Amino acid sequence: MAAGEDLTAQTLKIPYQGSRTSSSEAFLHAVRPRIGLLSVGAGNDYGHPHREVLARYRRLGIRVYRTDLDGTIAVKTDGVRLWVDTAKILTVPDGR
């Protein structure tokens, strides 16, 4: 950001599993993503992602996809438009 480079991107892989210091509001304003991709384990010991980080993305209108809630996340494009596909694998105890 300090170098003044253009950081804009339609998608952003949310850093550090959504920890408190992962993405400042200034950084998000510089990148201006439409979509945030968050790789995070369910019920992790660190409390990631932090509520204030998710609130920051929500407040800026950035749609967040999370591996703990959405499963596998695939971003596809035709060079103009962007699609996001998700696939949550459901497990059934004892296969019944």
Image (cartoon, grey):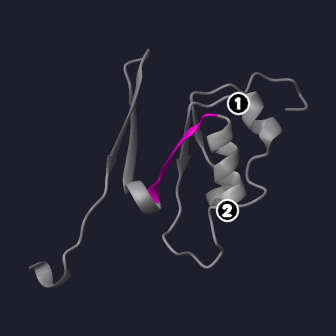
Q: Nearer the viewer, mark 2 or mark 1?
A: 2
Residue 10, x across and y down, in percent: 57, 28
On screen, 35 above or below 9?
below
The magenta segment: 61-67
Residue 96, x across and y down, in percent: 8, 79
On screen, 22 above or below 7?
below
Residue 76, x across and y down, in percent: 38, 31
* Residue situated furthest top in the rendering: 80
Provide the secondary structure element on which disc 2 rests: loop
Residue 5, x across and y down, in percent: 80, 23
Q: Callout 2 environment at 10 Å: few (<14), some (14 to 19), or many (20+)?
A: some
Q: Quadrant of residue 29?
A: top right
* Picture residue at 67% right of the left edge, 28% below the top: 32
Q: Which residue is mark 1?
A: 31
Q: Which residue is mark 2?
A: 50
Q: Is residue 60 left or right of residue 76?
A: right
